[in-house]
Image (spheres, coloured by chain):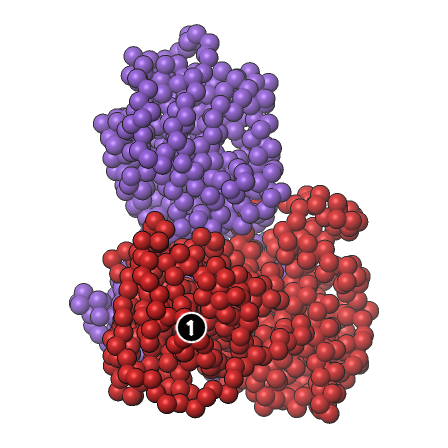
Chain colours: A red, B purple
Amino acid sequence: MPQLRIALAQVNACVGDIAGNSRLVLDQAARAAAAGADVVALPEMVLTGYPVEDLALRQSFAAASRQALDALPGQLVEAGLGELLVVVGYLDADEAGPRNAAAIIHRGKVVDRYFKHHLPNYGVFDEFRYFKAGDDLPIVRYRGVDLGVVICEDIWQDGGPVAAYGDVGVDLLLVLNGSPYERAKDDVRGELVASRAREAGAPIAYVNLVGGQDELVFDGDSMVVDAGGTLVARAPQFVEHLLVVDLDLPGGRPERDDAAPAGFEVRRSTLDVAPERDRTPSAGPTLAEPLSDEAEVWSALVAGLRDYVRKNRFRSVVLGLSGGIDSAVVAALAVDALGPDAVHGVSMPSKYSSEHSKGDAADLARRTGLHFQVQPIGDMVEVFVSQLGLTGLAEENVQARARGVTLMALSNLEGHLVLATGNKTELAVGYSTIYGDAVGGFAPIKDVPKTLVWKLARWRDEQAERRGETPPIPPSSIEKPPSAELRPGQLDTDSLPDYELLDDVLDDYVESDRGFDDMVAAGFDAGLIEDVVRMVDRAEYKRRQYPPGTKISLKAFGRDRRLPITNTWRERQP
Amino acid sequence: MPQLRIALAQVNACVGDIAGNSRLVLDQAARAAAAGADVVALPEMVLTGYPVEDLALRQSFAAASRQALDALPGQLVEAGLGELLVVVGYLDADEAGPRNAAAIIHRGKVVDRYFKHHLPNYGVFDEFRYFKAGDDLPIVRYRGVDLGVVICEDIWQDGGPVAAYGDVGVDLLLVLNGSPYERAKDDVRGELVASRAREAGAPIAYVNLVGGQDELVFDGDSMVVDAGGTLVARAPQFVEHLLVVDLDLPGGRPERDDAAPAGFEVRRSTLDVAPERDRTPSAGPTLAEPLSDEAEVWSALVAGLRDYVRKNRFRSVVLGLSGGIDSAVVAALAVDALGPDAVHGVSMPSKYSSEHSKGDAADLARRTGLHFQVQPIGDMVEVFVSQLGLTGLAEENVQARARGVTLMALSNLEGHLVLATGNKTELAVGYSTIYGDAVGGFAPIKDVPKTLVWKLARWRDEQAERRGETPPIPPSSIEKPPSAELRPGQLDTDSLPDYELLDDVLDDYVESDRGFDDMVAAGFDAGLIEDVVRMVDRAEYKRRQYPPGTKISLKAFGRDRRLPITNTWRERQP
């Protein structure tokens, strides 16, 4: 029975950096060869990064991707890597249009190409807009083994190319992915890959991107399952990793091309190969343990923030520190992502700020070691209030906006990226000031409900204690009742329901798109739901009128609702 | 030869206002019946408004649309309109998913339904995300005449249901549309409708929405062409209109259902009708003259602004008046859209503002009759500059941001919607301050290049003179060299190429998505293109880091580029 050593390169590609991503491919190929691998597979569209959105439609961009792909076979030979079978995702374009493509490279040539069959167009995906679908089933015979290739969504659809490969028969299926992180998605993904392996009657080697890209985070979670669906190897999440696995594969299959269902084009190539090399036995496959829920979310937030800053070529961030839980958690995330020297915290007290707020902000700075300054906003606010005669909400908002102008001025002076500190719950119900605390280029916890913010804070402090380090988040920021401090004695609970209950309702209304009647049937108090639904509808409406400075997704780690700005429909009329 | 009197109801529906839109349908049906019409057709998705974006995926919203549709036949009978054949667009949903649907209603029943076949998913359209496609070809025999129905995109695709109706044979094709305005689109649309009529071998009655919806404006342009493609009637653009036309139609066709191409489901119904009524002859069809380019663009901007304000339930707007051409044109548009009493202009001079700027702002206020106040920003700016030690760009930006905070404070106090006054050219090259002059809930001229801003200003003043009215825009705002006045003696030409040339390059790079080499081949100076491309790329990058307060479309009246925020690819490296 032929044995193949497979390497899966779980890498952090950067959208648009075609030259850098090409170097990444060459580097991973060299590492795979050094580990004695016969095959190395890289993720979906690794050459361009993913997702490229409207760049897919720019001819000069597609041409640049195609050029980089055409150069790869020669570069691999030059580096002494011609014998390695390299499977790599890239952006192609032909007469039909742009293609989400994979190339199979060997001995200085592109042996065959695969164009993704199923183009997802739901949630965060818009691929039907950008790509034309393929219908080919390339099969490459390499060292006696028949290999097939599919891309990401192809395994999420029934009756697709996996089933067709199963009908025709292959010995191993390579799956190239750009599959974004969602909470607990790794469980779903594992079961899916196992069931597709059984459907294909062959092992599946699944390789995924890792790292942050705009509002998405890729968690990796690359894996190999055998033909029976049993997990053989799994890479750790949220870090780059080369997963190397030895597989015994049947090989020597009869060619049953006529077994392919209608609409699929089987195409075969057989590769000349050097005799098998002597190589050291592999160390045995990695089988990474899944992370806890809190560890997984924290890692996703850190990876998303770090890559947003790094890939956009910032070196540092600045944020307002109120002494409250939200800014404390964002500061701790930023320090974990970038180190304390790259994080600048600004306390901006007003006449309504309590002593404990100012103290807690300073305590956070001491605990984390970030740069800290105090800029009172009293004089700024006073000029606006007296010249314009502001009262009530207008006066409350001008405090938040003076802070926004201050952070942007420090950003202009010193080049930091401004972080907005709003959490998902307050953004959902509109407990936030546009052009005020919403100011910022990135909002690290905009997808995190308030109750999860507390849970993450406790978890992060416990982790620190377990390691004998100083817990970054001041206990009093976790324990005290939350307040916006825009007027004397103000508490969040003056305007909002209890956060546990509120997050429960939001989960139903926003995450699950449930209607009013459904939610009442689920046992919620009708009056409470009326209140929450009205707040969310009003906030969504205001956010559409004045789109805030950061993109806001109310779905957990997902796509923002795309709602018409002008929309008089309400789940509950006011 | 049977004669039918057709009424096309070109109406301004409001997204989400299902009750209001139902009343609109009943009202138009009554007006059509009063005009002696046999048939009234209303636009695509008129019951929900269009486009509904993610609302299509909310079950409670689809149920509300379906309920309103189910109630219509009874309401029509109650109003004595049961004999009228009513064809109306709405949102349906069945097991397969949401449908972009049309219902044919007669004598208290929904006689048949049509589900849109072609779902556009380019430019401003995302219908593949929202709807499932249909494959039915309903044919209704009414007063001896065979009627077919299709929806919007169905006529923009070759080999679609129009050709299939042509194969089977119909006497008249009704086309329901939600077709947004683009410059000079009416010419393209007219030719297309004519060619489809020839393909169907039948006259086409084409009815379109009118009015603003978020960033789209529907221009109406409803029309009837005969089977030979000749224009018979045309509604005026940008206003509601009931277009009534008498058509002599052959009728008495043989039923050739087997002539339908594979994949289409022909379905027939024959309607009982009352004997033909006596009615007065119609006045003869309207044949509205096309508008000039300037008149068309001005009307689109006025309609877009008016409906944005009205449908979002604002009563008034506030904007900064600098004395320059951009704010003058936005003020004139606002006054045309809402009347002078609903427009509040604020002059916010700094120490760098020239006397002529302050004078021109006041002159504009006198000419248009809008509310005017002066709020100097010197004291506000001084506090930030001295406390934070601001210089250079940080000092320039704080001036623009003090103005933004002032406008938002007045909005909070008095309830106005803030208008941003930036034009497309300066937004494209990043000549704008985020959270400063970009503040606003709606940016009326964000799709208008600077050279067109001047052209529109001259055109509007000439129109006024021709009618013996005061030209709204001060001539010196049109004639003087443009300046941001954020430092002494500053002129736009210090930082930007000549606007004529700049708009030419932007048209190629942004509108036509041309690459660098293409543009050089088209005869532009390579150095100039390098400069412009670098400015646009940098501005796009900044705008992605700090999304501005208004949505920005760099395409004329089209969809914004959806680009990844993190994207290191540049057409030209810096």
The residue located at (68%, 63%) in the rendering is A425
* Residue A96 in view of the camera: yes
Out of B462 and B121, give the one closest to the viewer: B121
Asked which quadrant contains residue B453, the reply is bottom left
> Whole-percent x and y of residue B186?
31, 41
Instruction: Please identify the quarter of the rendering in which residue A453 is found.
Output: bottom right
Residue matched to label 1: A249
Residue drawn at the location 63% of the way across and 57% of the way down: A511
Visible residue check, residue B390 = no
Coordinates of residue A185 in the picture (x, y in percent): 58, 66
How many numbered marks have been drawn onto this rendered protein structure?
1
Picture coordinates of residue B423 (x, y %)?
Answer: 40, 60
Q: Please state the chain letter of the residue tagged with numbered disc 1 in the rendered image.
A: A
Comparing A405 with A480, the one in front is A480
**Amino acid carrying mark 1 in the image:** Leu
SS at circle 1: loop
Query: Is residue B438 positioned above or below B300 on the image?
Result: below
In-image side of B144 versus A230 (left or right): left
The 10 Å Cα crowd at callout 1, few under 14, some 14 to 19, many 20 or more, is many
Image quadrant containing the N terminus of chain B: top left
Asked if residue A482 lies left or right of residue A557, the reply is right
Query: Which residue sits at x=41%, y=45%?
Result: B119
